[in-house]
């Protein structure tokens, strides 16, 4: 028996949102690292976090130089598998 799906929606309580962000960010970076090592691929994860009344903060993980990966992304003209939030929201 699998876990039931939860509805993904913004977390309204600031402390809970901050704790969830830190845990999810670290988990995402770990998964990106594992994907890069296990599959011998270049991986980059870029996260911008801006809280009201505070400066924007940048978090990044890259298996090699993030600038080189971004430049490759910009120049790339081959087949792309692009995803958006709509692909994961269950909407039609």
Image (cartoon, helix red, strand yellow):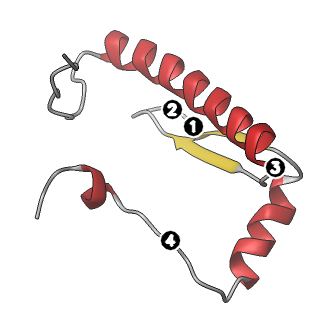
Q: Quadrant of residue 7?
A: top left
Circle 1 packing at 10 Å, graded few (<14), some (14-19), many (20+), is few
Q: Describe the element under mark 2 as helix, strand or loop.
A: loop
Disc 3 and disc 4: Cα gap in Å? 18 Å
Q: Say whether disc 4 or disc 1 marks the residue closer to the N-terminus.
A: 1
Q: Say whether disc 3 or disc 4 marks the residue closer to the N-terminus.
A: 3
The residue lying at 79 percent from left, 72 percent from top is 71
- Pointer 4 and pointer 1: residues touching (CB < 8 Å)? no
Give the residue at mark 2. 54
Picture mark count: 4
Q: Which mark is residue 1?
A: none
- Pointer 2 and pointer 1: residues touching (CB < 8 Å)? yes
Give the residue at mark 3. 40
> Which of these two is toward me, 82 or 24?
82
Mark 2 or mark 4, which is nearer to you? Answer: 4
- Pointer 2 and pointer 3: residues touching (CB < 8 Å)? no
Q: Position of residue 8 (x, y in %)?
A: 21, 34
Q: Say whether disc 2 or disc 4 marks the residue closer to the N-terminus.
A: 2
Q: Position of residue 28 (x, y in %)?
A: 57, 32
Give the residue at mark 4. 81
Q: Describe the element under mark 1 as helix, strand or loop.
A: loop
Give the residue at mark 1. 55
Relative to 78, say whether 89 is above or below: above
> Which of these two is toward me, 5 or 9?
5
Q: Position of residue 73 (x, y in %)?
A: 70, 73
């Amino acid at each position: 028996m699998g876990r039931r799906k939860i509805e993904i929606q913004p977390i309204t309580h600031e402390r809970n949102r901050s704790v969830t962000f830190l845990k999810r960010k670290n988990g995402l970076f770990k998964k990106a690292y594992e994907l890069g090592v296990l599959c011998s691929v270049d991986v980059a994860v870029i996260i911008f976090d801006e809280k009201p009344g505070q400066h924007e903060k940048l978090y990044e993980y890259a298996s090699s130089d993030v600038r080189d990966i971004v430049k490759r992304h910009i120049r790339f003209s081959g087949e792309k598998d692009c995803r958006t939030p709509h692909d994961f929201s269950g909407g039609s």
